[in-house]
Structures are given as C-alpha cells and as structure tokens.
Image (cartoon, rainbow, N blue to C red):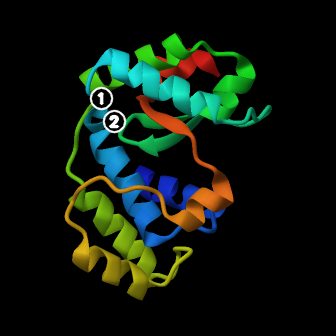
C-alpha cells in the first residue's frame, strides 16, 4: 500500500487543484479499473472516437500515468499526438477490463484519509470527511475545477498491456 501513497502524493503534486472527488475517483480507478465503462466493443470504440475528436494533441505529454494496482491512465492527448490508432487504444482498454485485477477500495480510501489527516492533500481533511460521509462507493466524475484546470482525457488500462506505447 506504500505504493499507492506514493501515487496519491505524485498526483497531488502534479494536480494541485484536485478536490476530494478527484482523489476518490483515483482510488476507485485503482481498485476497480475500467470494466464499469464498457457495454460492448462497438460502443467503447465510438465513445473513444468521439472523445478523441474533441481532444487536443499534447506533444511531450506522458502517455501512461500509473494509478496503482497495475493500472495506468492512458492519456488521449499524448496518444493523439503520437498517432496511436483508436483501435489500438480501444483494444487495450477492453483487454484491461476483461483481465484487470480488482481490489477493495476501502484500504485505498484509508490511505487517502491518512494523508488528509497529515495535511498532505491539496484539500483540507474536513472537506474529504464531508465528501466521504455521503459517498456511496460508486464511480464519480472529475470535479468541474479539475476538468477546467487539466482537461482530462484518458482511458484506464492495465499498464503492462500499454507499455509498448511509450
């Protein structure tokens, strides 16, 4: 679990505008991967194509950003800049959903709470406690603050399946 603490701290440093909901989303994705998003391959590819059409290229951006438990966020800005085919991204995404390791979210949330108690999060511990008191354990969307600051566009994939894209 020390690895997940390191991952959280790296995300807090890289994304100082993170809110509790964004940190909980990271915990959820690390615990459960991406299987909750896939209805079927055709739908997944059409959603990916739509998002890529609305995503700006970012040359020099990191393609894979580790999120723990063997998962990474595959950055669509960087993938588009490198010319990685949509079908390749979609295949990795679907294979990740089918074969991903699942874990409990509670230990990850405990690490997040511990960091908040120590004042090592970009938000106060009270705001995390308030958010978690109403959290139902489901996937959440990024906060508006995070979306405006960072324009997130990615797919959660198993890192080992996408390593060759770097």
* Disc 2 to disc 1, C-alpha distance: 8 Å
Mark 2 secondary-structure assignment: loop
Q: Residue 37 vs residue 19: left or right?
A: left
State the mark number for residue 113. Answer: none
Q: Secondary structure at mark 1?
A: loop
* Front-most of residues 16 and 87: 87
Say above or below: 13 vs 123. Answer: above
Q: 156 left or right of 96?
A: right
Q: Residue at x 67, y 61 (%)?
A: 149
| Residue 166 image offset from top left, x and y in percent | 65, 22
Contact check, label 2 and label 1, Cβ < 8 Å: yes
- Rendering coords of residue 82 (x, y %): 72, 20
Residue 34: assigned label: 2
Residue drawn where x is 47% and y is 34% of the image: 155
Residue 43 located left or right of residue 22: left
User: Callout 2: 10 Å neighbours few (<14), some, many (20+)?
Assistant: many
Image position of 48 with respect to 5: above or below: above
Q: In the rendering, at what x and y percent does residue 18 appear?
A: 55, 66
Q: Residue furthest right?
A: 59
150 left or right, relative to 42 = right
Instruction: Confirm whether residue 63 shows in the render.
Output: no
Q: Where is residue 131, by image quadrant? A: bottom left
Which mark is nearer the camera, 2 or 1? 1
**Residue 98 rendering spot, x and y as whole percentages:** 25, 21
Q: Residue at x 26, y 32 (%)?
A: 101
Tell me the residue at 57%/62% (across/down).
Answer: 146
Crowding near the residue tagged with mark 1, few <14, some 14–19, many ≥20 C-alpha atoms within 10 Å: some
Task: Count how many numbered circles sit on residues in the image.
Answer: 2
- Asked whether residue 33 is in view, the answer is yes
Residue that label 1 marks:
38
């Amino acid at each position: 679990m020390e690895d997940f603490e390191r991952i959280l701290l790296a995300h807090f440093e890289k994304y100082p505008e993170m809110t509790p909901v964004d940190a909980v989303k990271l915990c959820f994705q690390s615990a459960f991967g991406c299987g909750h998003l896939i209805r079927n391959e055709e739908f997944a590819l059409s959603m990916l194509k739509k998002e890529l059409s609305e995503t700006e290229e970012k040359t020099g951006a990191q393609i894979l950003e580790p999120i723990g438990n063997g998962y990474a966020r595959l950055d669509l800005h960087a993938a588009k800049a490198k010319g990685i085919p949509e079908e390749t991204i979609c295949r990795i995404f679907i294979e990740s959903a089918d074969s991903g390791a699942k874990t409990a979210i509670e230990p990850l949330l405990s690490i997040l709470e511990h960091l908040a108690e120590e004042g090592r999060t970009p938000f106060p511990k009270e705001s995390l406690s308030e958010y978690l008191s109403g959290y139902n354990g489901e996937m959440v969307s990024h906060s508006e603050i995070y979306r405006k600051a960072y324009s997130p566009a990615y797919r959660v994939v198993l890192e080992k399946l996408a390593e060759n894209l770097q």
